[in-house]
Image (cartoon, rainbow, N blue to C red):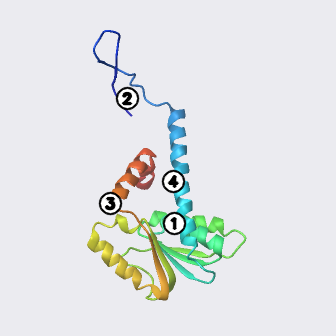
Amino acid sequence: LPKRKSAKLAANKKYEPEEEEDEEEDETTMRGRRKKMAKMLQGNKRLEIDEIARHVKPGMSVLDVGCGNGEMAIELANRLGVRVCGFDFAPRLVDAANDAEKVAALGRERRCLFVHGQLGYTVPFEGRTFDLVYTERCLINLPDWQAQRAAILQIAQWVKPGGHYLMVESSEDALYQLNVLRLRAALLALLLG
């Protein structure tokens, strides 16, 4: 990041801007900042997992819409012993989620299944199948309110009578701030990579 100019008062002189050194951050400093950012994001993720877990009861059928790498679903399955289905539009993330579940399932029966699908298009689920459906920063990535509304209506069709749909979403301002954090933490390169 470029350094800003600062003004200093010299004896009997008016304010004169002084150039600060325009050095790049060294690797150690950048690594430290990345670790702090990752720790902060990890703390937020833990809060989200804990909140969704409060609504999950043993024996429930759960759907993770926009499951990404499967972290949330796998944690819920391990912590609460429920079965979780997840889908995402990115095949690479679905593969990563299934690989993570295989590792997590060592010594136990697999509890998660991740498949490729996209809201509004191809989704391999029948109606009224799940006790609990949740989205976690999924709808905010849809292009506009009409697409978000259509997705909510589609999701509602998968919830059993008496079931619940939980939204862990963001506002447009929060999405902007999240993208700023992603850039600073160099996560955007991972997503596009």
Q: Position of residue 123 (x, y in %)?
A: 41, 79
- Front-most of residues 114 and 154: 154
Between marks 3 and 4, how big is the CA–CA gap? 19 Å
Q: Position of residue 109 (x, y in %)?
A: 68, 76
Say what secondary structure mark 3 lies in: helix
Name which of mark 3 and mark 2 comes first in the sequence.
2
Write the residue at 35% across / 12% down.
10
Residue type at numbered disc 4: Leu
Taking 33 as reference, is 134 above or below it? below
Name which of mark 1 and mark 4 comes first in the sequence.
4
Write the residue at 29% across / 73% down.
147
Between marks 3 and 2, how big is the CA–CA gap? 29 Å
Q: According to the image, label 4 marks what residue?
A: 41
Tags 3 and 4 touching, CB below 8 Å:
no
Name which of mark 4 and mark 2 comes first in the sequence.
2
Q: According to the image, label 3 marks what residue?
A: 172
Residue density around tag 2, few if under 14, some if 14–19, many if 20 or more, within 10 Å: few
Q: Position of residue 121 (x, y in %)?
A: 34, 77
Q: Residue furthest top?
A: 12
Write the residue at 53% across / 51% down.
40
Q: Position of residue 3 (x, y in %)?
A: 37, 29
Residue density around tag 1, few if under 14, some if 14–19, many if 20 or more, within 10 Å: some
Residue 95's tag is: 1
Between marks 1 and 3, how big is the CA–CA gap? 29 Å
